[in-house]
Image (cartoon, rainbow, N blue to C red):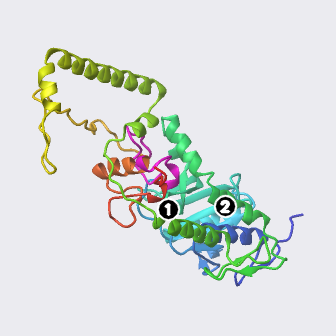
Amino acid sequence: MAAKALVTKYNGYNFRSRLAARWAVFFDTVGIDYVYESQQYDLADGLTYVPDFYLQRGIRFLGEEKPRQDVWVTVLRDVDLPDDVREQVVGFVQETGKNVLLMGGAPGLEAEVLFIGRSDKNELDAAMVAFIELAGGQTGLVAERELAKLEREEDQALVEQRKHTELLEEAYRIGRETEFDRRMKRCHECGNDFQPKNFYDTLCYRCFTRQRANRRGGKEAAGRVRRPTSSIDLLGMLQSVTPAQRRVALTVFGVVVFGLLAWSACQVVTIPGSVFAFLETEVGPTATPPLPATYTPVPTQEVNMEGLVPGIVVTRDVCSCAADLYECTDFATWDDAQACFDFCRAASGDVHLLDEDGDGFVCLDLIDLSE
């Protein structure tokens, strides 16, 4: 005998099941706007379909610039649909052209999530997907079949990390552990109900973390020093390549440095007179010191942009520019973040949305003020 659904009151809605209410808590925590049971659809053959949620701003897939619109959500205990529910979902997608997100089980990485819509050929298309945190803390989706197409293990690992971020794991935990029968509070910033950990909590998890980040940024802003950086960051490039490539690069770098030192030593030995004459030249307070006769400028290294093939995630010499995979916390240093921004801006623009104010300097929170 199937367990009877437990009607649950949360955020002004009377959810028909406790499971749907838990997914509503998940949506609130990650910032996905929704309305509950907003419309009923009368389909052919006398069928009726009432989706659980409508995502008001849609939801974006990894690698796509704009969110998918007309996304409706149905929450079930299992995505293996009974025949009657399958007919309702298929009929809804075929007759309306809208998208359905089926979510089976409680919020968590183990939940089964199926996205059903129309393909480019206007045919019914279903794909297993997973929630992922995109740049800027925005929650989106990634198709598992697209993840399987990635050939490089580094690219697959990067996407997998985005499925296990602190925001998503906390949202899963809150969605599973909220006890709706206990006292709930209303967040004074976003207005959503939440279950406080302490009696003095006045903000939900998402608003609390946002305010904490803003306070931290405000304290550091007074002491920030904007310093320019080169578009070529050798350290960042070495950290992003494989160990074999790193050894080759270090060997070439060592040979070049040794050659320059040897060349300098030969010049000092062969023409010491010109060197001493240069050192003894009197220079006024505003004069420009003359260069030695043997001075030769070292050519500036350039990044080779040839042979880069676009894809969902492509690891480049500096960083990936195929999708908004990075945010400031993904970089070890400010130089790494700025180098990635400069590298991608030349080819694709600010694909990672790191330059919020458009001044050309990114991730200033990473600047080490002790230097």
Let me know if residue 315 is in the magenta part.
yes
- In contact (CB < 8 Å): disc 1 and disc 2: no
Residue designated by label 2: 103
Pick the residue in front: 306 or 335: 335
Q: How many marks?
A: 2
Secondary structure category for the residue under label 1 = helix
Identify the residue at horizontal 29%, vertical 23% (top origin): 256
Pick the residue in front: 4 or 33: 33
Residue range highlighted in magenta: 313-335
Pick the residue in front: 142 or 100: 142
Q: Say whether residue 329 is visible.
A: yes
Q: Is residue 72 above or below residue 61?
A: below
Image quadrant in which you'd find residue 74: bottom right
Image quadrant in which you'd find residue 77: bottom right
CA separation in Å, label 1 and label 2 = 25 Å
N-term-proximal mark, 1 vs 2: 2
The N terminus is located in which quarter? Answer: bottom right
* Left or right for 108, reference 213: right
Q: Position of residue 280 (x, y in %)?
A: 15, 32
Q: Position of residue 202 (x, y in %)?
A: 70, 79
Q: Is residue 234 above or below residue 16?
A: above
* Left or right for 304, reference 334: left
Secondary structure category for the residue under label 2 = strand
How busy is the neighbourhood of tag 1: few (under 14 within 10 Å), some, or many (20 plus)?
A: some
Residue designated by label 1: 136
Let me know if residue 11 is in the magenta part.
no
Identify the residue at horizontal 87%, vertical 66% (top origin): 3
Disc 2 marks a residue whose amino acid type is: Met
Q: Position of residue 7 (x, y in %)?
A: 80, 77
Pick the residue in front: 34 or 272: 272
Q: Is residue 71 above or below residue 312?
A: below
Taken as a whole, is the magenta stretch helix, strand or loop?
Answer: loop
